[in-house]
Image (cartoon, helix red, strand yellow):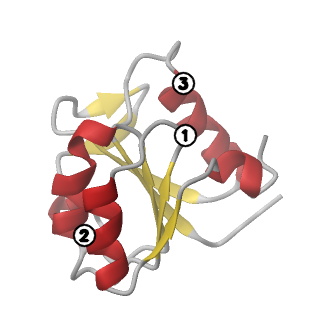
Amino acid sequence: MSDNRICVVVGNTANTNKYWYRIFRDIKKYGLKVYCINPAISEAEGNKIYPDFKSLPEQGTDLILVARPEIAAGFVNEALNLNYKDIWFQPGTYSEEAAAKAQSAGIEVHDECFMISNNIW
């Protein structure tokens, strides 16, 4: 299945045994173009990991998936003026502060699993 949406995963990991690496891998298999942000790592299995939104090769992509709630608010602040359309807080990552900021900027907020809601899993 192919999809021309572009996704940014915030808080991805290089550990292939972790849940978030599986999400990254499966989104790519599904056909979405995906970028990852994590200031702590620069690459995962040959895939470039970016330190922040400003470093991404494309701005204002369609959606953001939040992998780590402790960094959600800071990254939402950075993304507010970059024309993102949707933010998905995966189960266990919801941040009321980040969600309120996103909604006030006109970004649609989802508090559910992107993978299940979009029939990827």
C-alpha separation, residue under disc 1 versus residue under disc 2: 21 Å
Identified at 27% across, 50% down, the residue is: 72
Residue 102: in sight, yes or no? yes
Residue 51 in the image, given as x and y percentages of width and height: 17, 46
Identified at 26% across, 80% down, the residue is: 82
Q: Type of residue at label 3?
A: Tyr
Disc number placed over residue 30 in the picture, else none: none
In terms of sequence position, does the residue under pointer 1 or pointer 2 come before the other?
A: 2
Disc number placed over residue 91 in the picture, else none: 1
Identified at 50% across, 28% down, the residue is: 21
Q: Residues within 10 Å of mark 3 (few under 14, many from 20)?
A: few
For mark 1, give the secondary structure. Answer: loop
Residue at the spot of label 2: 79
Q: Type of residue at label 1?
A: Pro
Residue 16 in the image, given as x and y percentages of width and height: 50, 17
Residue at the spot of label 3: 19
Q: Residues within 10 Å of mark 2 (few under 14, many from 20)?
A: many
The reply, left or right, for residue 30 in relation to residue 79 is right
Image quarter where the C terminus lies is top right
Residue 2 in the image, given as x and y percentages of width and height: 77, 63
